[in-house]
Amino acid sequence: MPISTLLSGTGIALITPFQSNQSVDYQALEVLIEHAINGGVEYIVALGTTAETPTLSKEEKRDIALFIGEKVNKRVPIVVGIGGNDTLAIAKELSTFPLDFATAVLSASPYYSKPSQQGLYLHYKTLAAASPKPILLYNVPGRTGRNLEASTTIRLANEVENIIGIKEATDDMNQCMAILRDKPTNFLVLSGDDALILPQIACGMKGIISVAANVFPEKFSEMVRLCLAGDFDTARDIHYRLLTGYELLFEENNPAGAKAFLFEKGLIENVLRLPVSTVSAHLQLKIKQYFNALPTEYR
């Protein structure tokens, strides 16, 4: 099956649960893996930015990746997040990180450095040459400080064989449509915005790497599949039922919102690593009230 098919639908940007002593909670991580797979997500994204990877040591990243690979046991594809703003260091990591179980690598654009479009092009070209697995670009300018422009994405799509798609997390629909219009046929365009996935699939995207799928894997992935099947009327009902949930997830911080929801579901301890902190008491109450008011099938 081609990668563009394997990675269509819903990928979950899996959080990293911690115990109260700040260590990785592997028991809860296994629960979350089963929650996602049983909920019907098409694949799992390990060590994305939602996993609080900037606060994980190299050893923890390797251990988490291997644990996820073992527990998933080929039931669904796995994408591994490996990115940063030191191109040569990331290229070295790609060549040494355990990726035998992975279908692809998701690599966020460099943060803080604010490279030119040529710098971004050369960064990704270098990573693609070093990676033993296909690369998904990840454009998230709200966090990195620099937009990967549509023209640069298309240039990489056409010129670098090992780059097979993009997670596009700008809310600029014109940019999204420019990529969809000009991309090569087999280049995979995925959303990074839970609240926009319905109209983005209508424009031609093939799925999403989702934060909301941590909390609502069954209904969210059902909604995405309905959209991909062209049943927007049914999908719209789910979308609007979850819309307030999307807003609450990102009201203060990601993944603090996702962890607040998962705490209400009884799946994890509500623990994050600084500089990210738990949501305010006011927002936690809003999340609790919203969650408790949802129909049973959404919980």
Image (cartoon, helix red, strand yellow):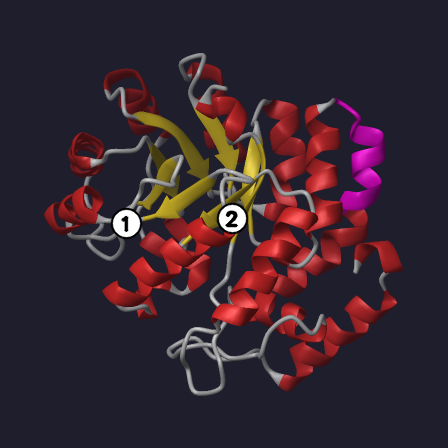
Chief secondary structure of the magenta portion: helix
Looking at marks 2 and 1 on the same chain, the residue that comes earlier in the sequence is marked by: 2
Q: Residues within 10 Å of mark 2 (few under 14, many from 20)?
A: some
Find the distance from the CA under tag 2 to the CA under tag 1: 23 Å
Out of 200 and 221, give the one closest to the viewer.
221
- Highlighted range, magenta: 230-239
Which residue is depicted at the point 17% across and 42% down? 95
Question: Can residue 252 be seen by looking at this rendering?
Answer: no
Q: In the rendered image, which quarter is residue 298 located in?
A: bottom right
- 205 left or right of 225 in image: left
The residue pinned by badge 1 equals: 83
The residue pinned by badge 2 equals: 72
Label 2 SS: helix
Residue 276 is labelled as: none
Which residue is depicted at the point 66% across and 77% down? 283
Which residue is depicted at the point 50% across and 19% down? 1
